[in-house]
Amino acid sequence: MPTVLTREQVTAIAALAHLELDGAELDLFARQLGSILDYANQVQQIDTTGVPPTASLVARQSTDRPDVVGPSLDIADTLANAPDADRTRLEGGFFRVPRVIG
Amino acid sequence: MSDAATVRGARDLFRSRARSATDLCRDAIARIEALDPALHAFNTIVSDQALARARAIDKEFDRWRDAPLAGVPVALKDNLCTRGIRTTASSRMLERYVPPYDATVVSRLAAAGAVVVGKTNCDEFAMGSSNETSAFGPARNPWALDRIPGGTSGGSAAAIAARLTPLALGSDTGGSIRQPAALCGVIGLKPTYGRVSRYGLIAHASSLDQIGPLTRTVYDAALTMEVLAGADPADATSAAAPVPEYTAALTGDVRGVRVGVPRSLLEQGVDGDVSRALTAALDTLRARGATLVDVELPYAKYAIPVYYLVSTAEASSNLARYDGVRYGFRANPEPRLPNHDLRQMYAQTRARGFGPEVKRRIMLGTYVLSAGYYDAYYLKAQQVRTLILRDYEHAFQGSGAVDAIAMPTSPTPAFRIGERMSDPLQMYLADIFTVSANLAGLPAISIPCGFTQKPASPQPGEDSSSGGGLPVGLQLTGRPFDEATLLRIADAYERDTSWWKETPPILAAPPRTSDPDGPLGRRDHLAPSDPRDPRGPLAHE
């Protein structure tokens, strides 16, 4: 049975992903994600009883370091790529975003 | 005689003072200026910075003489952060991003005396298999300009194949170094996960990503790995394992080396010319003393669905950072407009900053991580990942263990630009032989092993579009942290073959570039927003 995503499902995923999609994109992704998931469904046939998941291939190793202050990025360098920033106030400046609280 | 189109050759020319770093740099820039308008291998070229750096090296010749990559021009995939040099990941989202720091591999190359000449084209955020998802248009294959160079490190592979630079770096999440290396006829090595620091690599899927070299010779790849590999305090996933002298492993002796061949996996849809080239390559290795052994990788056929579930989940999380706040593109830049709120800004920034393939993967990854689907897709994929890992462990350990596993790198030679863009699933299937090395974290190398056959009776005026003369790659996958054995086998094979010496037609007859509007015409290397884009150019201020 082919997997079909509804427009409502795609809209809900887009909201979770903070992506604004237009009507054509909603229809396209409903179809394409459905066919990709159809293909991916073949993993469901595999018996994985008792098989642990692999999330990472890193051998456990200590990553502790001495708790001392080291160099970090300069504030002006950091703000240089900001779409909007106030570089004049608060010890070197800050990122500016649209109003968050009414 | 030293050949400036190899890393060792260029370095030796510098060492012997036959060519200065400035000469080598100037030559590389001249080649790029002549051929890149047709290839579009570069997003950004930094001639002035490169020449200044080369002059500084020449001025202190004694200090740099013995540096391993002294004076070697290098091209960096445009998802590796370079301080002061625009780093776009071929996305509108980062079109004007200038990193305030260098990736660790970039610092290591600089300390070894290499000279960065530019940033290479790739798929957007390294998502694709053909370089066609680049927001700035695809790079082209030097062997056939109407075909893809492979992806995602397509610009890096094209640059090496066309001799623009002797060394390029790429990154490989599901085959993105090896597949373009195969399709362009060059060497591409994906190291073991953790062998090379990922600090400063723009993240795609963090449990799969690795950085590695693209070169013309195996020696050059080995030499570069001696520079790149090693632990890095800035990347907690980098491994502390000691770095061997890879060039010392290139003995030419593969007697007694056991090479596994997963015959049943290779029954799935491999192009006839690719199959023939693989068989001939295996014969060459056997003639040199290697033993061929059949191996079974029963779960490898599930690698593509597992890869696209795991990698998109990780990508959806990694790409959450592009929110229009700290760097990159922001939609609705005027914060004091009425009816403007933060969530709307995020959603519109991401809608306009990301291209279709990136959106598709963020959507898929968000879906497989969402409540109700996590166990069925993401957890299941991670469990099958364990089974794939065990397949390889079984092959590399115990009785009948092999030292490397041989496969084609890509099931087909380079396809035509545009051929698969309308069907994402068809595009994903191109990665069948490469993704499992990422899922298992294993090192893998692609080396040139032949060309597709020319048609029996070429028609007058017939060109590359006939499908003949396209490079084919042999992939060797090895044990964790055993890049040395892969390099040894690859080098032995290279000694018995001359595929790597073949030159693409673009070098014999450089294309005319006088028509700036032609499909292969000169491109603006600053790659500004396409004014024909119906959404209009993106404003940043």
Image (tube, rainbow, N blue to C red):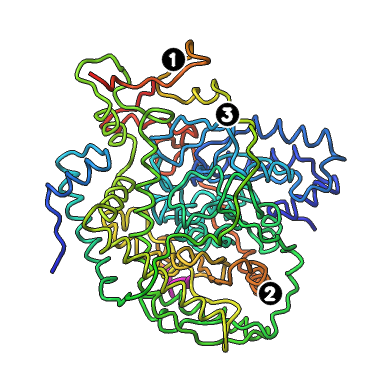
Q: Tag 2, which secondary structure?
A: helix
Residue B144 showing in the rendered view = yes
From the viewer's perspective, is B75 left or right of B434?
right
From the viewer's perspective, is B385 left or right of B153?
left
Chief SS of the magenta region:
loop
Q: Where is the C terminus of chain B found, in terms of image quarters?
A: top left
Q: Could you tell me how far apart the alpha carbons at marks 1 and 3 are, in whole angstroms?
A: 17 Å
The magenta region covers B452-458
In this rendering, the answer to whether B54 lies above or below B397 is above
In this rendering, the answer to whether A44 lies above or below B461 is below
- The chain letter for the residue carrying disc 2 is B
Residue sitting nearer the eye, B24 or B539? B539
Q: Mark 2 highlights which residue? A: B492
Residue B386 shows which numbered tag? none
Q: Is residue B454 magenta?
A: yes
Q: Mark 3 highlights which residue? A: A73
Contact check, label 1 and label 3, Cβ < 8 Å: no
Identify the residue shown where x is 30% and y is 77%: A47
Residue B213 showing in the rendered view = no
